[in-house]
Amino acid sequence: MKPEYHLQVSQLCKSHGRRLILNEVEFSLPKGSCTLLTGENGAGKTTLLRILASLEKPDRGRLRLAEQSWQPWRKARRMLQQRVMYLHQHPYMFDGTVEYNLRFALGSRVPQRDAEPLIEKALRLIGMESFRKTSARTLSGGERQRVALARAWLRSPQVMLLDEPTANLDYESRQRTLELLQRLRNDGMTLVIASHDPLHFEGLTEQRLHLQAGRVEAVELNMNPATQPANVILMRRDYA
Ligand SMILES: Nc1ncnc2c1ncn2[C@@H]1O[C@H](COP(=O)(O)OP(=O)(O)OP(=O)(O)O)[C@@H](O)[C@H]1O
Ligand SMILES: [Mg+2]
């Protein structure tokens, strides 16, 4: 059966000065899949993720979203902004408590009484219930990453791009993060994870994109069904 793609990219090029970082890159992200993005320091992983999230412009490129035809990158920017979310390795925290940071992610469309149970659930998911009233700016790097993941869960993007999401995490936080990513993926979110630690994501990722000398090589990975937990409905599509 032909796989259903969420997003397809082709002819993607990006230079910084004279350096060609991405050279005619092409790849596809199957719907609800998890893709691991690897490559040496400076290979262009962050650049690629930032372009996908529309935080940076490519020099050229084409894009195809599931239900649409191929289009030049500049025409797809708005759509990308609406659907794709980038999680920075060192996430920015707003001034205020952890609770405030989570509430902010929900925006004004969610009434206060609906927001409360969602915030509680988000805190539970990341195991940070006791940090609710803590000033977010005082959190450690690993704690910030977990709050950022909870914010993303509340925003419920269709595609989530994670830049080194486990780099600062101890064993327990890492397991919790992986569990959350697994749930998001099982519920249909398409994930791309840039990491230098592919072993952390074994069993979660079914495709690996390796960036080298500006090119992407796609490798299919074997999934181990024993590591797949039951499907859990966790998405907040109604507020997306
Ligand atoms: N704004 C910029 N101006 C100039 N050069 C840049 C800019 N952003 C990135 N680069 C260069 O582009 C190359 C790719 O950077 P990028 O951050 O995408 O690599 P990476 O694969 O994410 O590396 P790492 O594993 O260290 O995170 C690097 O050589 C970097 O110096
Ligand atoms: Mg990087």
Image (tube, rainbow, N blue to C red):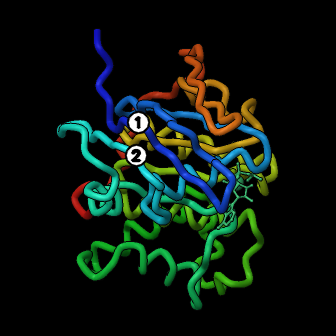
What amino acid does circle 2 point to? Gly
Ligand 1: give its quadrant. Answer: bottom right
> Residue 114 appears at what percent x and percent y?
28, 72
Instruction: Reply above or below: 111 against 175.
Output: below
Q: Residue at x 25, y 57 (%)?
A: 75
> Residue 102 appears at what percent x and percent y?
47, 74
Residue 231 quadrant = top left
Disc 1 crowd rating (10 Å Cα; few below 14, some 14-19, many 20+) is some
Disc 1: which residue: 10
> Which tag, 1 or 2, sits closer to the chain's start?
1
Q: Are marks 1 and 2 in contact (CB under 8 Å)?
A: yes
* Viewer-proximal residue among 3 and 124: 3
Q: CA distance from mark 1 to mark 2?
A: 6 Å
Q: Residue at x 54, y 15 (%)?
A: 225
Q: Of helix, strand and loop, which one carries label 1?
A: strand
Q: Of helix, strand and loop, which one carries label 2?
A: strand
Disc 2 crowd rating (10 Å Cα; few below 14, some 14-19, many 20+) is some
Disc 2: which residue: 61
Of all residues, the one furthest to the bottom in this rendering is 95
What amino acid does circle 1 point to? Ser
> Residue 11 appears at what percent x and percent y?
43, 38
